[in-house]
Image (cartoon, rainbow, N blue to C red):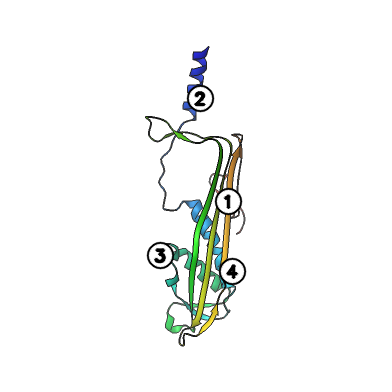
Amino acid sequence: MLSRLALSLLLLLLAGCSSTRATSPTRSTQEMLLITTAADRAADALAAQVPPQLTAWIDPSGFSAEDQAYGMAAIKDALLRRGVRVMNDRSGADAVILPRAGTLSTFEDNTLVGIPSLPVPLAPGVLVPPLSLYSENDSKGTAKFAASIYDSKTGRLIVSTNPAYGFSHEDDGIVLFFFSWHRNDMGMDFSKNPPQVTAGK
């Protein structure tokens, strides 16, 4: 009787094991979505403080190389939608916009009540999945932009904006092994395969 029970438990354990191998960029897809969604919102808040109908050149030196590509593009898009004429050359602009990024980052908080995922001895890459009475993963994206706008010829200050913030959020979890949820404010449904766009940001 005991031997049958032990065999059944062993088979259940082996059935629950999983072998994982993944490659990923420096930032995961969902981390990038959190950051870029926050950046879009901060860019909108920043552009709202810039005088419309301005003819300006954007100085990218206030951004780090890692965040420059998307952050600068988001700010340029927000400015264009508000009527600012963006020039490719400083000589043709009446003003210079010098945006700066205070932060473009994520914060993650993980809670687990149960047994975490554990490696199987002598089997590299094989994991026993976690047994979760309750688990929750809470992630937030934050962006902070500001800008100095000055006359391209005289250097006289036109506008110094207030800090513009953007935030994004997602959380997922599971209760009693079976009841799960996944929520976010980025307009994506990650519970579908493949993920689906649900609503605008």
Q: CA distance from mark 1 to mark 4?
A: 21 Å
User: At 62% across and 55% down in the image, what residue appears?
Assistant: 199
* Residue labelled with disc 3: 65
Q: Amino acid at mark 3?
A: Ala
Q: Amino acid at mark 4?
A: Ala
* Residue labelled with disc 1: 170
Q: Please tell me the numbered disc located at residue 12.
A: 2
Q: Secondary structure at mark 4?
A: helix
Closer to the chain start, of discs 2 and 4, is 2
Q: Amino acid at mark 2?
A: Leu
Q: Are the residues tagged 1 and 4 within 8 Å (C-beta)?
A: no
Closer to the chain start, of discs 2 and 1, is 2
Q: CA distance from mark 3 to mark 2?
A: 49 Å
* Residue labelled with disc 4: 45
Q: Are the residues tagged 2 and 1 within 8 Å (C-beta)?
A: no
User: At 51% across and 25% down in the image, what residue appears?
Assistant: 12
Closer to the chain start, of discs 3 and 2, is 2
